[in-house]
Image (cartoon, rainbow, N blue to C red):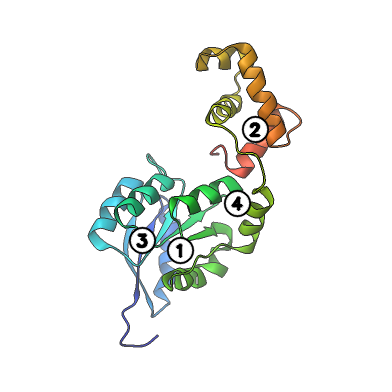
């Protein structure tokens, strides 16, 4: 690092204290990086971003209350040039696509953090995107899929809750035949044999939060 260059100022958003401690320890070993603020929920992240306006934000997707995606959208809405790297346990293509569409510049799996974190921070700071090969491959493999409609996503959520067709119809205020039609469409689009496999695939790909 050029001693005349200021360090990369970083904000970390994650609700697990031990995880934040681990990331902070890694960043502390780097002379060109400085952790300036830590947050544990989306609302605080939005407030602290306004205050510190960090160079890089490390954002978990699973937060108490509003999600990390909500925080990304809010921050990027106010600060379009904000550079945000998602830190998550989700490899699913849906979660990755949503995060990148919301304005995230990087997507890191927590399982690979030790290997990829520092490179990702520097890469995104220089104005590039950073998406690990394994995530990019999953996104590419599923890019041609037919997207589920909002109604189908609602039905899928009800299926994950263990509800039968009649209960789903009542909950959604639609006919039983409509529910059956939605389920048939869902199975075809995500290539599931039955409703149980549909829920498993939906969780793996990030349609449903686990």
Local crowd at mark 4 within 10 Å, few (<14), some, or many (≥20)? many
**In the image, residue 88 lies at what x, y percent?**
51, 53
Q: Are dots 3 and 2 in contact, CB under 8 Å?
A: no
Mark nearer the N terminus (1 vs 2): 1
Point 66% across, 20% down: residue:
181
Mark nearer the N terminus (3 vs 2): 3
Q: Are dots 1 and 2 in contact, CB under 8 Å?
A: no
Q: Are dots 4 and 2 in contact, CB under 8 Å?
A: no
Task: Judge left or right: residue 192 versus residue 176.
Answer: right
Q: Return the mark for residue 199.
A: 2
What residue is disc 4 on? 91
**In the image, residue 164 lies at what x, y percent?**
63, 16
Identify the element where label 1 is drawn: helix
Point 35% across, 62% down: residue:
81
| Foreground label between 4 and 1 | 4
Q: Where is the N terminus found, in terms of image quarters?
A: bottom left
Q: CA distance from mark 1 to mark 2?
A: 33 Å
**In the image, residue 185 lies at what x, y percent?**
67, 28
Q: Are dots 4 and 3 in contact, CB under 8 Å?
A: no
Mark nearer the N terminus (4 vs 3): 3
**In the image, residue 11 lies at what x, y percent?**
35, 62
What residue is disc 3 on? 82
Identify the element where label 4 is drawn: loop
Note whether residue 41 is visible.
no
Q: CA distance from mark 4 to mark 3?
A: 23 Å
Q: CA distance from mark 1 to mark 3?
A: 24 Å
Q: Is residue 181 above or below residue 137?
A: above
What residue is disc 1 on? 22
């Amino acid at each position: 690092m050029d001693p005349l260059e200021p360090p990369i100022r970083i904000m970390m958003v994650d609700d697990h204290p031990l995880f934040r401690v681990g990331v902070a320890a890694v960043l502390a070993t780097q002379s060109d990086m400085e952790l300036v603020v830590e947050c544990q929920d989306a609302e605080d992240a939005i407030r602290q971003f306004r205050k510190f306006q960090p160079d890089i934000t490390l954002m978990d997707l699973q937060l108490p209350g509003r999600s990390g995606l909500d925080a990304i959208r809010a921050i990027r809405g106010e600060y379009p040039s904000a550079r945000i790297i998602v830190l998550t346990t989700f490899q699913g293509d849906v979660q990755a696509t949503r995060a990148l569409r919301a304005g995230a510049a990087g997507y890191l799996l927590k399982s690979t953090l030790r290997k990829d974190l520092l490179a990702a921070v520097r890469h995104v700071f220089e104005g590039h995107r950073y998406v690990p090969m394994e995530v990019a491959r999953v996104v590419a493999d599923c890019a041609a899929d037919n997207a589920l409609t909002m109604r189908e996503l609602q039905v899928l959520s009800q299926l994950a809750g263990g509800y039968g067709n009649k209960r789903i119809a009542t909950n959604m205020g639609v006919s039983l035949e409509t529910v059956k039609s939605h389920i048939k469409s869902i199975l075809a689009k995500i290539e599931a044999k039955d409703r149980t496999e549909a829920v498993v695939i939906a969780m793996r790909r990030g349609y449903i939060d686990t």
